[in-house]
Amino acid sequence: MNNDRYIAAIEISSSKIIGAIGKTSGRGDLDIIALEQEKCVESVRYGNIKNLEETSTRIARIINKLERKAGVAPRVVGRLFVGLSGRSIRSISSEATLTLQDDTEITQDIIMRLRDEALKKAIDSSLEVVDAVPGIFTVGKTETRNPIGQVGNRIKGSFDLIVCRPEIKRNLSRTITEKAGIKIERFVVTALATAHLILKPEEKRLGCMLVDMGAETTTVSIYKNGGLQYFATIPLGGRNITRDLTTLNLLEERAEDIKILSGNAISISQSAVHNLNGLKVQDVNNLVVARAEEIVANVVEQMVYAGLKDSDLSGGMKVIGGACKLARMTELLAQQSNLHVSVGKLPDGIIYIEDSESNPGIESLEVISIAYAAATLSQTDCLEERRDSQIIGQPQQQPLQPQQPQQPVQGQHVQPREPVEREEQPVRVKPHKRSLFEGFKRRITNLFSPPEDDESDLLD
């Protein structure tokens, strides 16, 4: 009997859209049989879709290319697991308590009731809860990470509520379901999915920081004692460096090329008259270094907001995302955090790439993680037989039903902490010939407010 299932996933960021189809047989591994991507520069900002029509067109093209792959055809994509990320996503702590009858055995149903109570926590009306990550449980007077099977008459649990602005999910639904005509099976929090795949259990127990450095945002997830300890999104990314370089009278495309070919996160000694196609190398170096140090300063400061020191994170730091490919960026992170820093990669023996035409670089980690989370935490088959009348981009008859919060990607538990509700602003710095990292901690405020030159997350 063939138990193969097919998983279709898509990840929409501010620089690109990537789609993937994987095949799983239930053994715990995933074969990626198709990968496709499209550039997406101005239609998505800070994780929120701004141009619905253009984005849906690009998604339709990606799906069409995926369906033409040898391992997929003649089947078509009927359902999608969609990554959820963006500037407004962060965590808020919540606790709930249930009083039970004497000598009640704790079951999964009781845990779900406790989780439902935690989801009722009053939060900002502008935010929506998209996931609830379990923490420490107390049964009677005993603290535990796994309460199922214990006996007591009272249980208390802590949860990290992952929240975002409703517009993010609403615009994804309008773009994918209403315009592209594909059902969203479930939203998956991208940061939790990548940690589920990339971080080892021992790294989560020892303490580890996962940093996803994207085009317009940098997401920081900190794990300790086996579970999520802290989660935040910084509105800074690799495109900030590119836009700084446009002040040298460059188009953004040319500035991006110069950043990739000649940018360096750590200051280097160059003659002021040394030119790079008419540009002074030192001018380029000053701009790149200043912004790289600003991004790193904000990343490192997240340890302070989490109430942790570098000595608490002996599992080190894993970095992913396109911006971490800037020359010596990982070295700068290691210098300023005092942590062992390495680039995240796909684990051996779990993920296999069968699509010989694709090049799954570091930018594909997120969509592969979404597909892996879907494969291991659900029984959904996303492909279906092609109907003669089926056309990509044709709206489906039934509207999307409201999505229920998915089960947490990780099932570990963490120590309760105070809600992370304060809003901080990334530090702004000016180019300088020497290192600018000193003094950053005195000037870091409100990380979650929009940058000065940014538009709102909300559609007009």
Image (spheres, grey):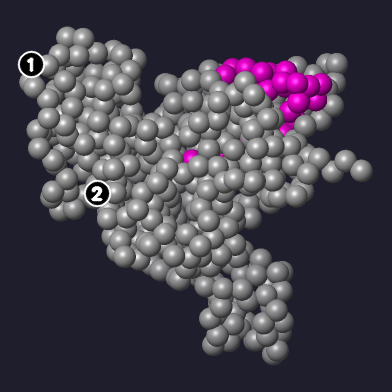
Q: Quadrant of residue 313?
A: bottom left
Q: Is residue 345 magenta?
A: no
The three-letter code of the residue at mark 2 reads Gln
Q: CA distance from mark 2 to mark 1?
A: 29 Å
The crowd level at tag 2 (other Cα within 10 Å; few <14, some 14-19, many 20+) is few
Residue 135 percent across, percent down from the top left:
52, 68
Task: Give the side of residue 355 with respect to residue 285, left or right.
Answer: right
For disc 1, the marked residue is: 273
Q: Is residue 83 magenta?
A: yes
What range is drawn magenta here?
56-85
The residue drawn where x is 65% and y is 86% is: 152
Residue 339 percent across, percent down from the top left:
32, 55
Residue 320 sits above or below residue 114 on the image: above
SS at badge 1: loop
In front: 165, or 271? 271
Residue 108 percent across, percent down from the top left:
70, 69
Q: Quadrant of residue 367?
A: top right
For disc 2, the marked residue is: 335
In front: 152, or 28? 28
Q: Which of the image's four quarters has the N terminus?
A: top right
